[in-house]
Amino acid sequence: MTAETAKRHKGLRLLRAVSVLLAVLLLLGLGLSLVLASRAASLDAEADNPLIRVALVYGTAVKHDYGLRADHGMILGYADANKVFTPILTTEATTLHACRDGNMVFTSSKRYILAGNGQTVQVGGYHIALDCSPDEVEAIARLLPEESIFSFWQDGKQSLLLGQYTSENAAAEALVSLKNDFAMTDTEEPTPFQKALATATVNIPSHTAVVLVDPSTHRIVWKFESSDAALRVGVQAIQTEEEHTHLYGMPLPYYYAYDGTLLVSPNQSGSARGIQVVNQLPLERYVAGVIPYEVSNAWPLETLKAFAIAVRSYTVSHFNKHNGAYGADLCNTVDCQVYRGFASANARVLQAVAETEGVIAVYNGRICSTFYSSSTGGCTANVWEVWGSNPKTYPYLRAAATPWEKYSQYGNGTSTVTATGQQIYERLKARGYTALDSAVTDITYTTGENTSYVYTITFTDKNGHTLTLKGCENISINLSPYVNSANFVVCQSGETVTRLNYTKMGFGNTTAEPTLGVLVRSYPNDHLLVGRQEFSVLTAHGTHTFSDSNTEYVMSDTGIHEYNLSHSLDSQYYPTIIGVNGQELPDLMSLKTLVESETLQTEGDGSAFVFIGRGWGHGVGLSQFGIKDLGDLGYDYETIFKAYYSGVDLITYADYLGVS
């Protein structure tokens, strides 16, 4: 403590009076922010637009810090287990790092890490704890302009912390120096600061604490510690009347734009010690943040509306999925739904969400678990054959023909992979299967009910041992080097193999484009109004049968007549509806499923097996590329949605809850 600093002690009363005035002004501004924040929290918690929690950084992905940015500063507080956010203070800092408590180094990558031996510490983790109100911040800061002074929230009690020291001894020595410099006299009434110094202690780093640091000054803005793990630091962006402001979070080197509240807490799962981050926000905003990262924000509006319903239904049917592990309803990966905030939520996405606001799918009054995958390859799979689920629980997740899906045009829609019998044996052995002891020489399989997805597969090795796998997902995982889904056929190279195609009147046969090493019989296909059945007419010269060609000639008693088998003729043989743009389309809800076989000729000499696959993913429920195709054709969102989920009803979440 310098002599100049000690002299300031005589002017403490005047400075304190000024600081009180400043504090009052500060609190008036803060109070307005808190009222607005509290009101926002109450609006977020409407029953038909509930708050959900999405884990952003968790498990082994945690780092020592997490960057936060907001254009107009931030509101700092905490949220409880009931998702209620309690604001504590505001800060004008536009960038903060939420960090684990301790001595920290600021790296060249602009991240805080725990300091090691010999490293220069930018943020000391030891402080002087003062039992006084945060109102005293301004007064003490004027007395000690070189020291950091910040608020400390610990289990409901607010106090102040002074200084950022690198050791407990350094903090203790500084406390002794302060007591000497500001020693009380017999003739002078002690100030609040002097009283706080008399009972001050050293605050040491805690594994249950979070500190928020301004990287421009390396000064701590707030420290939060709770013995109740359900209470987590909450950070919101300060809003203005002129614009909506996002809170930007930094997972690794990138900032993503988020709405609502970012919750940060210390994670101590095994060796993974760092900051866990969860985004708490209203359901409808979350849906808008998923759509552009699961599908394209440039796809047809009706497609995005159908997908919004799938995202919303999946969300409300999976509340608390990760509550035990991460304190969240869902995570932000394909394990749940990919969510990266709002940077790509354009006007089309927001319109799709707004025009389906609150709409969910139900079956017999129960919310549907609306699973989806990238592409399904011409038909979907039965959920009970994929994951062993009870068909009575998920009757709407049954196999459906999707002949409109242009899977052969997708980057992940088709695959052809060759593997030797030895490679297949080694793969199965690496997966833990011991029934085989030599190279595979034969493979047989069966498909599921009304689907081309493989449900059972049996491998036989050269010594006659067999291994049978059951379940579409189990099979595709164990054979993942060779297939992208369980929708595949396999044979020895050089042989032919037959596969089934599930189609509907009004749509062409499921086209499989020729791929490397496979010669495929190709069908004429414009994905609409093709694939007519043969029919016959009675003429003066007998019965004439029409084949599947563009033009036919019929002899009648009035001469030869030319018929063009066009849209108008085709539509007489199946029901149609009018699409969103006025075009006549096959009525998906009324069309019967047709089953056709297709012969594939593979190339080779029989020394290997050829896996010919379609689709990408588990195949249950909606196909993301498939709904894009239906949107391109002009179908409305309800038809698109119900083409994949059998027998569902669409209602609002408010109606489901019985609230008005």
Image (cartoon, helix red, strand yellow):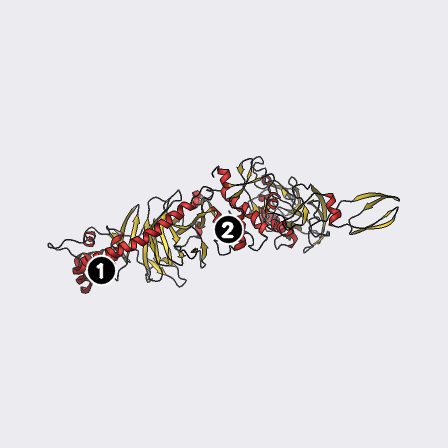
Residue 263 falls left or right of residue 17: right
> On the image, numbered disc 2 is attached to which residue?
288
Quick check: 310 left or right of 596? left
Q: Residue furthest left?
A: 187
Secondary structure at badge 1 equals: helix
Let me know if residue 134 appears in the view. Answer: yes
How far apart marks 1 and 2 lie (CA) works out to 50 Å
Q: Nearer the viewer, residue 82 or 449?
A: 82
Q: With 341 as the anchor, is 163 left or right in this view?
A: left
Q: Quadrant of residue 7?
A: bottom left
Task: Residue 49: give x, y in percent of width and height.
Answer: 46, 44
Residue under label 1? 143
Quick one: 494 or 412, which is closer to the camera? Answer: 412
Mark 2: few/some/many CA within 10 Å (<14, 14-19, 20+):
many
Give residue 464's position: percent from left, percent from top: 65, 42
The answer to which of 474 and 533 lies nearer the viewer is: 533
Residue type at mark 2: give it. Answer: Ala
Q: Which of the two discs, 1 and 2, sits closer to the camera?
A: 2
Amino acid on which the number 1 mark rests in the picture: Leu
Mark closer to the chain start, 1 or 2: 1
